[in-house]
Image (tube, grey):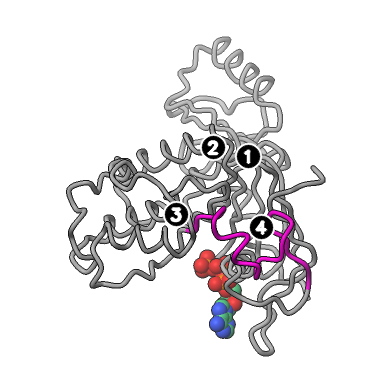
Amino acid sequence: MSTNPVIDVDELNVRYGDFHAVKDLSFQVEPGELYALLGTNGAGKTSALEVIEGHREAASGTVRVFGQPPTDRGAIRPRTGIMLQESGFSDDLTVSESVRLIGRLTGRVDALDAVLKTVDLSHKTDTRVSQLSGGEKRRLDFATAVYGRPELIFLDEPTTGLDIQSRDALWDVVQQLREDGATVVLTTHYLEEAQQRADRIGLMHQGTLRQQGTVSELTRALPASIQFSLPPGTATPPMHSAPVSGNAYVVETFDMQRDLKQLLDWADDHAVELLGLSAAPTRLDDVFRAVGSEPATS
Ligand SMILES: Nc1ncnc2c1ncn2[C@@H]1O[C@H](COP(=O)(O)OP(=O)(O)OP(=O)(O)O)[C@@H](O)[C@H]1O
């Protein structure tokens, strides 16, 4: 860990009355990193992010953003773009007025036309927010988060409700900002996006951080799988495999190369056709399911 993380969270606790929503959460986000804070519903991600974004007070713990307390909005806001889960735009403002307003509030400047073009809203510049579709509102939200090319960008479920072209366009913009050194904090329930994009992932469940690491560090503890079906009447292969239904089999493995070779050699030797053969690495979904079924900590 560097001595100058962009975000430094130490023993953060968030409470709503008697309810303890975030429990002793500690993590750091390094410069230029894309850190995905993932978790089950109600895990405490939004609560933690609200403190880090300066929107909520912690019950206890220390949070620093660019070395400053998040409540020091004057120092942090010009350097930070935030795409919230739900936009807080005024329905009466037009698209261009909404982006300009965020620019004024945060002190960031940018070429408005160019930013609207990247999110494909050039043709909606003078349209009121109330007349935008759900996906267009999300794209406007994203435009305000990246306006002024901030050094730190929070993306809270950024692609929810977006079609595939808009998702690809959004990730292209994020990629360009990252190439310029931007740091990104992502929350999403689309695990394949996190698996593909994140440098590191923190997995929260019931208020605590249960696992943290790169995708390969998180998936290492769970087996990958080989799946196939056998023609009726074929003998069972000489390896630990569980029939899932009828003649369909799943082999769970921590050594894909060895087990796949053994299976293919056996099939060759016995002239057996392995129907629908597929070999799949461990997915983040599997880690997520395992964490989501863990019991609560006190
Ligand atoms: N204002 C509030 N008052 C009381 N409880 C709250 C409040 N906001 C959130 N909570 C509770 O705190 C817990 C954490 O909520 P939070 O929104 O931080 O979770 P999350 O990880 O973002 O969930 P999701 O993935 O469902 O958006 C939940 O049990 C939620 O019901």
Quarter in which the C terminus is drawn: bottom right
Q: Residue at x 56, y 36 (%)?
A: 250
Callout 4: SS? helix
Asked if disc 3 and disc 2 are in contact, CB closer than 8 Å, the reply is no
Give the mark nearest the N terminus, 1 or 2.
1
Q: Which residue is drawn at 54% across and 56% down?
A: 78
Residue picked out by circle 3: 145
Query: Crowding near pointer 1: few (<14 within 10 Å), some, many (20+)?
Result: some
Residue picked out by circle 1: 32
Asked if disc 1 and disc 2 are in contact, CB closer than 8 Å, the reply is yes
Give the mark nearest the N terminus, 2 or 4.
2
Residue picked out by circle 2: 178
**Disc 1 and disc 4: Cα gap in Å?**
27 Å
> Over which residues does the magenta segment extend?
61-82
Callout 1: SS? loop
Give the mark nearest the N terminus, 3 or 1.
1
Residue picked out by circle 4: 291
Tell which tag, 2 or 4, sits nearer the viewer. Answer: 2
Give the mark nearest the N terminus, 3 or 4.
3
What's under tag 3, amino acid-wise?
Answer: Ala
**What x and y, as percent, mark residue 258?**
69, 20
Quarter-of-image position of residue 181: top right
Q: Is residue 251 above or below residue 72?
A: above
